[in-house]
Image: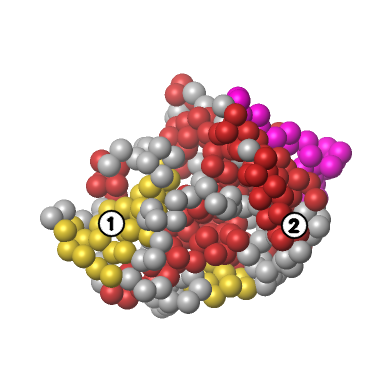
Amino acid sequence: MRALIVTFLAFQSLNHSKSWPKQFDAPKAKWTELKTSSGYNYETNSYLIIAKQKIKQSTVDEITTLTESVRRALVLFPLQLIVKGHQDNKKKHIVRIFEKESEYLNSGTPKGTIGYFDGSSKEVKVSLEHLIETKNKGSNLQPRQRYRLLVHELIHQAMGDQFHALPTWLSEGIAEYFSALQYAPGRYRFSNCSKQIIEHLNTVWLHGKQSIVEVPPIQILTKMSNHTWAKDTRINEKKAYAKYASALFLTHYQMELASRELGGLRKFLENSVINIHEHRNKSVHFRPPDQTILWKGKSLKKIELQICEYWKKKGLDIHFTGKIQTTESNEN
């Protein structure tokens, strides 16, 4: 246990010396195709992508480059977003791609989802028809293959134990943050990201139709468990993305607005990793890190006001008034 903590602290000292990344362009991934009795396997250095149908070469090029990029993008940050050393390097990370949404749902994924990271099997599951953005009405431009959904689920997979140990809003917020900042397969732009976040929200949710964006208040969001989050997604399917947007705004606040020194967020993530090690190696009950370290004495209402003022200047009118449905009887 002592050796693990020493290794962790040494890695943290390296992370502290990193500067904030501006951009990351992943090299094109190498892959091989294998026809199997049940479909096709596409294997890269770190991933095994399983599909029942043959996927065209250009699409495989994009997907494989993207999958290989995710962990490298996470490691760029001066934060403990990914725990190093725990994953067996010889074991491939599995991604299952289904041709139709019906096949995706029949595989056991939760109702109301279009992408899913299974914490038990450690597999990512997505539907191919949801990976490529649809063409915008009134535009002559062809849809660009950005695979935002796949990035989101791959971030969960890459974060591993961190995904389960962090508050749900922060896990989902980090996944959305990286989804928004990937502007082409395996290519990320981390500087001046507000424009990309707005574009991301318009693509996946707003579609340029809403002048006022209603999202759940921070006080509600930060208390949501994985169970409550999943239940709201199922019951309140048409408005389910509002909590993801709220999580994205709050994660952006922690990353960009609270402090570029990232003191509170860094300490929070460090405490989370230490708790994971103690839980795994000493069989003690996992103690979620105290979220108050993130707010640095500010009231949640004051933070909401700061977030609203920032995005108002960017052309986005945010209201922290959205509601969460957690009981079947609330369904209309």
CA gap, disc 1 to disc 2?
38 Å
Label 2: state its secondary structure: helix
Q: Give the range drawn in magenta.
A: 284-309
Q: Residue at x 86, y 39 (%)?
A: 297
Where, by quadrant of the figure, is residue 131 drawn? bottom left
Residue 126, position in %: x, y? 36, 52
Query: In the displayed structure, does residue 87 sit left or right of residue 9?
Result: left
Based on the picture, tell me whether residue 286 belongs to the magenta stretch. yes
- Which residue in the structure is indicated by mark 1? 50
Amino acid type, label 1? Ile
Picture coordinates of residue 279, whole percent (x, y): 59, 31
Residue 136 visible to the viewer: no
Q: What residue is at 80 percent from the left and 50 percent from the top?
A: 263
**Residue most extreme to the right:** 297
Q: Identify the residue at image location x=27%, y=42%.
A: 107
Q: Give above or below for 208 relative to 270.
A: below
Query: Residue 159, how many percent across, how many down?
Result: 54, 49
Q: Which of 19 and 274 is in front in this view?
A: 274
The N terminus appears in which quarter of the rendering?
top right
In the rendered structure, does residue 169 fall within the stretch colored magenta? no
Q: How crowded is mark 2: few (under 14 residues within 10 Å), some or many (20 or more)?
A: few
Q: Do the residues labelled 1 and 2 touch (CB within 8 Å)?
A: no
Question: How is the protein colored in the picture?
Answer: secondary structure
Residue at image position (74%, 67%) is: 19
Q: In this view, does 60 lie to the left or right of 182?
A: left
Q: Which residue lies furthest to the front in this view?
A: 3
Q: Horizontal and vertical percent for residue 277?
A: 61, 38
From this view, report whether residue 209 is shown above or below residue 169. Answer: below
Q: Residue 194 carries which label?
A: none
State which mark lies toward you, 1 or 2: 2
Q: In this view, does 283 lie above or below 34?
A: above
The residue beneath circle 2 is 13
